[in-house]
Image (spheres, rainbow, N blue to C red):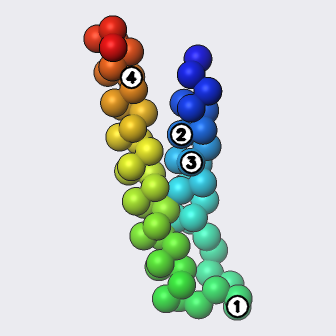
Amino acid sequence: MNHLTLLYLACILAGFALANIPTSSFITAGLASFFQIIGSIAIIVFGLVLLYLGVRALLGK
């Protein structure tokens, strides 16, 4: 397995963690929405990269 694939999966999990940060007294509502946007972008970008790598592997590079 490609070692970058595991890194991309870890980035997707980090995106989910950013998107689901609970609002506390330290994080205001505006900052929580910023983290949700950044997390969503990370999920989409690294998900697309994993799809690209999968299709490339299926087609034989």
Read off the residue under disc 2.
Answer: 8
The answer to which quarter of the image holds residue 32 is: bottom right
**In the displayed structure, would residue 22 be above or below residue 40?**
below
Tell me the residue at 46%/55% (across/down): 42
Q: Within 10 angstroms of label 2, few (less than 14), some, or many (20 or more) residues?
A: some
> Are circles 3 and 2 on residues that touch, CB within 8 Å?
yes
Report if the CB atoms under discs 2 and 1 are less than 8 Å apart: no
Q: CA distance from mark 1 to mark 3?
A: 26 Å
- Which amino acid, mark 4? Gly
61 in relation to 14, above or below: above
Question: Callout 2, which amino acid?
Answer: Tyr
Where is residue 45 drawn, in percent x and y?
39, 49
Q: Which residue is mark 1?
A: 25
Rendered residue at 42%/33% (across/down): 50
Q: Position of residue 1 (x, y in %)?
A: 58, 17
Give the distance between the C-alpha atoms of the residues marked 2 and 4, in whole angstroms: 12 Å
- Please name the residue that numbered disc 4 is placed on: 54
Task: Pick whichever of labels 1 and 4 is earlier in the sequence.
Answer: 1
Q: For mark 3, what is the residue?
A: 11
Q: Secondary structure at mark 2?
A: helix
Q: Relative to 13, is 55 on the left or the right?
A: left
* Residue drawn 56% across the image and 22% down it: 2
Of the two numbered discs 1 and 3 on the same chain, state the one appearing first in sequence: 3
Helix, strand or loop for disc 3: helix
Q: Are marks 1 and 3 in contact (CB under 8 Å)?
A: no
**Amino acid type at image mark 3:** Cys
